[in-house]
Amino acid sequence: MIRASLHLTVLAGTLALAAACSGTFTSKAPVSRAYVLHAAPAAESAAAAPRFDGTLRIQRANAGPGFETDRVLLLRERRELDFYATGHWAAPIPDMVAALAIETLRRTALFPGVYGEGTPMRADYFLQIAVRDFVAEYAEGGEAPVARVVLDCTLGRRLDRTVIASFTARGEAAATANRMGEVIGAYESALQQALAGVSASLAAAAK
């Protein structure tokens, strides 16, 4: 009786495994593609002399509630946070924002050198970014979303931790259609706008 019971248990487990494997190979779940964003091209003034007398280190961005993720987020009715099933970012949002901030500021004439976390290079200033908003928002009755990016920034001197400037940079861009490619394009435009605002605020702080 015990041997027969054991045989039935093993058989049931084998059938369950076969069913699971079958479900895997015939799944109709949408494939999630990884997306990257690009920094804006360098401005013509990038060859000018640096405005700050030292190098800059950009810290990993802090994430507001819901933004410590690699999901491409969408917002409905101003409160309902969701994500697209068919796409995700190639890195978590804070890492992606910091990487593009480094690339953007390296293309400016503000600092003789711009580095990220983990570098052995000496830095005289630090920039801390907090991601307050990074969503594609669907307005009531709207077919395509508007991508919105809001970055709260603090520039400080590393030697004495003195805060030199605090400011908020924003970007907004409407997707031309409710398709993943167009939504990603809107995100890229919004983030480029926000990082252009970061550069402008840093330039103002250097005067």
Image (spheres, rainbow, N blue to C red):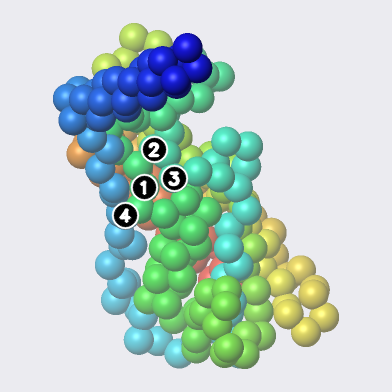
Q: Is residue 207 left or right of residue 30?
A: right
> Disc 4 vs disc 1: Cβ atoms closer than 8 Å?
yes
- Picture disc at residue 26: none
Residue wearing tag 4: 37
Residue type at mark 4 is Leu
Of label 4 and label 3, which has the lower sequence position? 4
Residue 96 in the image: state x and y as whole percent.
44, 57
Residue wearing tag 2: 72
Residue 15 in the image: state x and y as whole percent.
29, 20
Residue in front for this viewpoint, 17 or 60: 17
* Helix, strand or loop at mark 2: strand
Numbered disc in front, either 2 or 4 = 2
Please identify the quarter of the rendering in which residue 117 is found: bottom right
Q: Distance between the Cα atoms at labels 3 and 2? A: 7 Å
Residue wearing tag 1: 89
Please identify the quarter of the rendering in which residue 129 is found: bottom right
Q: Distance between the Cα atoms at labels 3 and 1? A: 5 Å
Residue type at mark 1 is Trp
Residue wearing tag 3: 70
* Helix, strand or loop at mark 1: strand
Q: Residue at x 45, y 25 (%)?
A: 82
Instruction: Judge whether residue 125 can be spotted in this image.
Output: yes
The local crowd at label 3, few if under 14, some if 14 to 19, many if 20 or more residues have their Cα within 10 Å, is some
Q: Distance between the Cα atoms at labels 4 and 3? A: 13 Å
> Disc 2 vs disc 1: Cβ atoms closer than 8 Å?
yes
Of label 3 and label 1, which has the lower sequence position? 3
Q: Distance between the Cα atoms at labels 2 and 1? A: 6 Å
